[in-house]
Image (cartoon, helix red, strand yellow):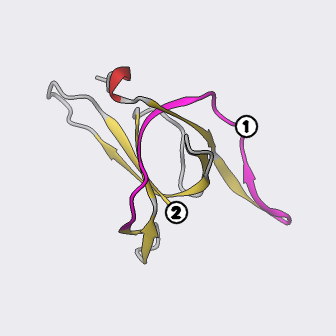
Amino acid sequence: MKVPGWLLPHRITVEPYEGDSAYGPLYGPPLAEVAALVSETVRTVRNREGREVTSTAQLITAPDVACPPESRITLPSGRITTALHIAPHTAPGLPVPGTQEVMCE
């Protein structure tokens, strides 16, 4: 079960991270506007390596949004940020929607 669209009132743009090149990070083509619930608050989280870092935005999206860590995200405010950590939330067999939580720089 996917999260209902009316619970995701914001629109963001995601450019999926595809690796590094000699000139810096490589990003895929921007996804069409992605529905999300955006909270621009400061929180301390752990990144992929387990180090504590500061997250200044948290997003809730549908579970099928392609947003690997280090992806570039444009928030509704126009601010461009980077995905630090992605946490899928599922509950197989239960009547609750699946979501994906994205912690951003």
Q: Are marks 2 and 1 in contact (CB under 8 Å)?
A: no
Residue 63 location, quadrant: top left
* Crowding at mark 1 (Cα within 10 Å: few <14, some 14-19, many 20+): few
In the displayed structure image, the side of residue 25 where residue 104 appears, left or right = left
Q: Is residue 51 above or below residue 86?
A: below
Q: Quadrant of the N terminus?
A: top left
Residue 5 location, quadrant: top left
Q: Which residue is mark 2?
A: 105
Residue 26 at x, y percent in the picture: 75, 53
Residue drawn at the location 40% of the way across and 74% of the way down: 50
Q: Is residue 26 magenta?
A: yes
Instruction: Point out which mark residue 29 bears.
Output: 1
* Crowding at mark 2 (Cα within 10 Å: few <14, some 14-19, many 20+): many
In the displayed structure image, the side of residue 103 where residue 24 appears, left or right = right
Q: Is residue 27 above or below residue 6?
A: below
Residue drawn at the location 53% of the way across and 31% of the way down: 34
At label 1, which amino acid type do we have?
Pro
Q: Which residues are magenta?
A: 21-43
Given the current orientation, which residue lies at the most extreme bottom position? Answer: 51
Residue drawn at the location 33% of the way across and 36% of the way down: 99
Q: Nearer the viewer, mark 2 or mark 1?
A: 2
Q: Secondary structure at mark 2?
A: loop
Near-viewer residue (73 or 10): 10
**Total numbered badges shown on the rendered structure:** 2
Instruction: Point out which mark residue 96 bears.
Output: none
Q: Is residue 6 magenta?
A: no
Residue 47 at x, y percent in the picture: 44, 68
In the displayed structure image, the side of residue 69 where residue 53 appears, left or right = left
Residue drawn at the location 14% of the way across and 28% of the way down: 94
